[in-house]
Image (spheres, coloured by chain):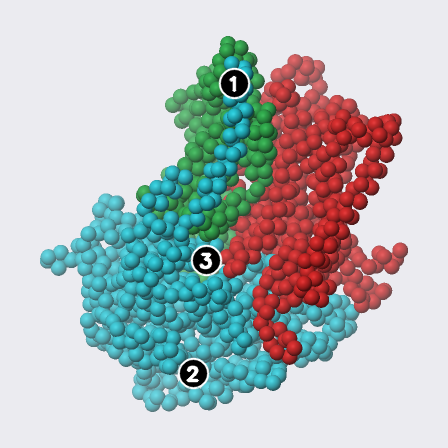
Chain colours: A green, B red, C cyan
Amino acid sequence: MFAYVLRRLLYAIPILVGVNLLTFALFFVVNTPDDMARLQLGAKHVTPEAIERWKVEHGYDKPLLLNTRATGSAQLTDTLFFQRSAAMFAFQFGKGDDGRDIGNEIQTRMGPSLAIALPVFVIGLLVNITFALLMVFFRATYLDLWGVVLCVVLMSISGLFYIIAGQYFIAKLWNLLPISGYAGGIHGLKFILLPVLVSVVAGIGSGSRWYRTIFLEEIGKDYVRTARAKGLSEIRVLFRHVLKNGMIPILTGAVVVLPLLFMGSLITESFFGIPGLGSYTIDAIQAQDFSVVRAMVFLGSFLYIVGLILTDISYSWVDPRVRLQ
Amino acid sequence: MSLVTSHFVPVLLWTDALIFMLLIVSLAAVWWIRRHAHLRAPWAAVARRPMAMGAALVLAVFVVIGLLDSLHYRERLDDSPPDRPQYSVEVLSVFDALAGRLRTQQEKTYSAPLAMHLYAKEFTERDGATVRDYPRLKYGGAHLKQADEYVPDIVRRILVGLLQGLAGSLLLFGLLAAWQARHERMRLGGWLSAWATGHLGWPGRTVVIVLTLMLILGAVMARLAAGYHVFGTDKVGQDVLYISLKSIRTGLVIGTLTTLVTLPLAIVLGIAAGYFRGWVDDVIQYVYTVLNSIPGVLLIAAAVLIVQVAIEAHPDLFDTAAARADVRLLALCVIMGVTSWTSLARLLRGESLKLRTLDYVEAARAFGVSHARIISRHIFPNVFHLVLIAIVLDFSGLVLAEAVLSYVGVGVDPAMYSWGNMINGARLELAREPVVWWQLGAAFVFMFTLVLAANLFADGVRDAFDPRLEERR
Amino acid sequence: MLGIGLLAGCSDSWNNPYPDTDAHANVLYSAFSERPKHLDPARSYSSNEAEFTGQIYESPLQYHFLKRPYTLIPLTAEAVPKPRYFDAAGQPLADDAPTTAIAESVYEIRIRPGIRYQPHPAFARDATGRFLYHALDVAALKDKTQISDFPQTGTRELVAADYVYQIKRLANPRLSSPIFGLMSEHIVGLKALGDALEKASRAHPGTELNLNDFPLAGAEVVDRYTYRIHIKGKYPQFIYWLAMPFFAPVPWEADAFYAQPGMADNNLTLDWQPVGTGPYYLSENDPNRRMVLTKNPYYHGETYPEDGDGADRQAGLLADAGKPLPFVDKAVFSLEKETIPYWSKFLQGYYDSSGISSDSFDQAVQFSAGGDPRLTDSMREKGIHLVTAVAASIWYVGFNMLDPVVGGQGEDRRKLRQAISIAFDYDEFISIFLNGRGIPAQGPIPPGLFGYVDGVAGLNPYVYEAHGGKIVRHPIEMARKLLAEAGYPNGRNAKTGEPLVLYFDTMASGPDTKSRLDWMKKQLDKLNVQLVVRGTDYNRFQDKMRKGNAQLFEWGWNADYPDPENFFFLLYGPNKKVATGGENAANYDNPEFNRLFERMKDMDNGPERQQVINAMLEIVRRDAPWIFAYYPKSFGLRHDWVHNVKPNLMANNTLKYRRIDPDLRAARRAEWNRPVLWPILLLAGSVIAIIAPAVVAWRQRERTTA
């Protein structure tokens, strides 16, 4: 088990190097260090000397991938790419172009992101499973039919509309909750309610429909028929067997997104003014802050790989036939 | 003839070319499927589903509008010399020509749906004195002399539209009944009773009802649009109905062309990884894990910026605003395709891994049949249903993604008609007092209709093609 | 639902984003939409940063809060300094000496004694007088992430050396001050200091530079409270820079404190944690969420101005005359990036004022018969007040004068530009996109600045005409005629017959880009000229401007200081963007204009200067290198409980004048934010209504099968 995880983590290194190389190439095609300097220095009274100085100060005066002026291994190491990437593997993200420490920023922003993402994940899972079970329970009645239609309808609405409508009605028209903002601790509860509610509702459509199919698949299996033939009541069958076995694909499917919860949600966070990693990423894209974007890409891919490993482990845990090798 | 041709010069944008290529491929596929019974069977199953058929009809309307909007041309300038015709830089489409007044009748600024006045008060000269009032619109309700004619006029238009729609659908229904009865060699009465009781073998009732509803809706809209702005006007006084209809093409292009990019990558790489295994598998898995692990938005943001740079570097290649917007749309499709092929590829890889161990595939290999032949004969046909399901399922997700990307600022060109841009603009409108809601509302209605129809149709296709689901029912 | 119920127990307004305990506190609430990048006075240059730095740092001079035109008054200085002039031999010259004779101007500034810095750990000393926190190691800083994590604070008296220290900081290459380039042309020895610092910085890359070791010839400390600045030649505009945070004092202790290893890693830098003498200090700095300014307990004190005009008295702006400043104990700025929440919270009473210029608030305003803006009835019922002011800035559409089609000084090119200027109906633009929040521009100088001529006398005769005392745009026929004379009858090249196609470059961002681009196209349709709009991002746009690849482009300029020189220099030939990288983006270069500019910039305000300015205006209006689009007006809204608001586009230290009535605010908030409960009941009811029949049906089925 331990050896397996270790090997998988080592296997992750070439992937992370690839990710890094790709983002590096993409963003430097677009934004030369000169562009970045100009963006940071503002529009007024900017002289070419000021740009040169900024580049030197921020270490952007080195060649990108290959330093032809250096000798030996320094040809590769004394470059922008190496200097910026090597530290990242030790989770030293350095400073953003605005001068703030990225690692520090990630630490403080993780909390708010999780404060939204975790409840959305847990409540969403519970609500979706409840809905799906209800539909399965009342299968072949009008509730199931219209439940599925409702799911498809809910799925067909863009997430942006849920947010806009939620803010407009609940916060603005009915004065029930603050429209945006964030605070730590118990006082922060009222800020979290609205984004969580909106995100959960936005996810009901696809979530419950998917779980419904999983439960239906389970219900059609032989052991369920046997159980029913034994005279177990419908509710017992549903909870004892269908729910229990259906949870395996649901949970293992959910594990992969678990680490990514840290990254937060781009849209929700910026609409509701949550100072999390999602809005950090959006800000970085809009400000074209290359260092932050790369740090976020790195973090995102790392967490994704962790998610994959967790999925494998959870598979072997629920199904002993799957062996980790 | 020469008179007609010299009035415009056709313009073939990149996306137009791809759309029509896609159309030709689809038509060829339809022709191919019709000739093969085993391919036809699942489609016949789709055709038996009322929900799917109703959705398909709605989709068809969207597709027709999108296709009409993909036939682009540049108008000849009125006063250009006949020997050396010159053309406007504005790129129009056949749809624009059909929409005619919708496009050209621009008000000054906001007006509410079906309004006859602007949404903001202005100073107007009336009887020699300056008064502050809501000015009348230049076009919307301009035919009315008195304000009290307004309600009767609207009611009259709705009623006329209703009647015209009903009459049209009755006519169509009659023709359909006559043709079907002849085709099935039944008596008209017999066919009608079979239709009414739902014993036709295809969802005749649903199709007719949906068709009737659409015709009525279309006729009422057309009646109203002739005199009013049905969905109001936007900030620069453009008809919101027109904007919403123009956005259909953008939505369809993103939903379909992206899959066009996805498919070759996913099919070739997915099957290759599963079939060849070994180092091929390793490399492909490496590539798709790398791509998958980069948050999509960031990748798309970078790609869109690259395209911007490319456009600025070659201003002569993209000499019209339409060409610039178009190439950005295409780039968006490509990059979304590049980021989204991985899930399908993974699915196909798994399936191919299973298929390659089957007896007849092993046997074929033992006989020295070439890999290309095995893949095209044995593997590909057996995973095709997965590809198809993926196409229809992805479509709606892509349409929805466009809105979010435009919101983040990395979506389609800001000058392009799209639902994402409409929603983006509505952010400011909702903060107005009183609220301007119709642009958001129109975007919602159109997007919702398209996505809902696509989802319902996709459900039908999936149920028909996925044998696992079929046997459970 | 339970959560909502719990909250209901705590307060009357469920949607209150602030703790209920603060309901009656003397705290001002507002928002910021973008996190400030720099709070270091040597680096900060944008207006959203000035909102904070203006309250914290005190430059020697400030603008009078009420007086118009903008007047400089002393802040920490004893008096507004008058420059003394010297010739090349160092001999003093008379005040009216010719510009050419002046080799150096000297500003001697005397600051008031007894001014103290805000409490800050950088000043904290132990019993023996040694600095407590100047020799910390990384380990000691591990858990220190905010300034408030340091238990001890201290203060120190402000001395003249702090001002000189800050001027040296402008040259520090590690700070890349945005005005270093400009100032090194004016301040004696600043360039040399910059070079010396850069050399030292390269020689010792890891270590902090001690600026006290480097001399600056142009800034000298005379005594504890007096310092002198030497300016090359004559630069009358320099006095305005002395009212900007760039010339505010920075104590060397702060630099030494923040230079300690480990500080920067915890985001403890002067760029984020300012140290000033102003009425407020930054007590909480969480740019991701909120920034809090708290009253500086060591503030030297100032009183509310007593000299305002009749209009100010009528507006109640003199009610607090003579009272000690500041009024508000605390100011809380919350991050609000989206317009909808911002606007909603303002209407709910959770923000006291709505920032001075935001696009989304325009529908709140109507225009009265006289064209004066007025709030809508529903707004006025809420007791919301409107604050308007014309900003000292201009938006323009520039023609690239290097472009073969629209550029050049030929008579036909000039007519083409004039025709296009008439066709771009910015009067309509203002009413559609700004809802009247702008004034059609008649030239480069906005109102409120010396040189601006009001009314019909100041119209641009090439675009406008007087019509019964009103300024009206020339009819479009005139533009068509000019276009024909320029060689494009009906938008066609008279020689080749080809249609005229123009390219318009703009930074396309923001939700209403699409509408704006459509509008642009519509304008030239009137002339049958084809316009291709090329929207692009900031970097690409800048790139084009630098290379001179654009044809038409849209740009704006915000005044640094209220002097016409700050606008005319945008058209001064030697400032051309292409080749010199200056601010003259149109690359306009007219020798006559250049000559007049050189004369005008050193003149004192007066009839003679006005004459020169008029001559310059005539030249640029005729040459039309810009379409003078509009001078934006800023509209702000404030609630009834906010007092002493007068827009001042030059001053940014106006928070200290603000007064609020917290009790009225608490009452209004409670009144406006009563929760509406029926939707919750309706939702619960409908869920029951949907599920109940199914439950009943299931029960029956159970009973029959059992």
Q: Are marks 3 and 1 on the same chain?
A: yes
Disc 2, SS: loop
Numbered badge on residue A36: none
Residues beneath discs 2 and 3 located on the same chain: yes
Could you tell me which quadrant the N terminus of chain C lies in?
top left
Q: Which residue is mark 2?
A: C602
Q: Quadrant of residue A90?
A: top left
Question: Badge 2: how crowded within 10 Å, few (<14), some, or many (20+)?
Answer: some
Give the label, 2 or 1, closer to the camera: 1
Image coords of residue A296 (percent x, y): 44, 43
Q: Return the residue nearer the eye: A159 or A93.
A: A159
Q: For the residue marked with disc 1, what is the amino acid?
A: Glu
Q: Nearer the viewer, mark 3 or mark 1?
A: 1
Earlier sequence position, callout 3 versus callout 1: 3
- Does B319 sit left or right of C328 as displayed? right
Q: Is residue C251 left or right of residue C309?
A: left
Residue at position x 36%, y 55% in the image: C670
- Report which residue position mark 1 lands on: C702
As rendered, which of C408 and C520 lies closer to the eye?
C520
The chain that hosts pointer 2 is C
Q: Residue at x 69, y 66 (%)?
A: B146
Q: What residue is rendered at 88% in x and 57% in y?
A: B2
Which chain is indicated by disc 3? C
Q: Which mark is residue C343?
A: 3
Mark 2 or mark 1: which comes first in sequence? 2
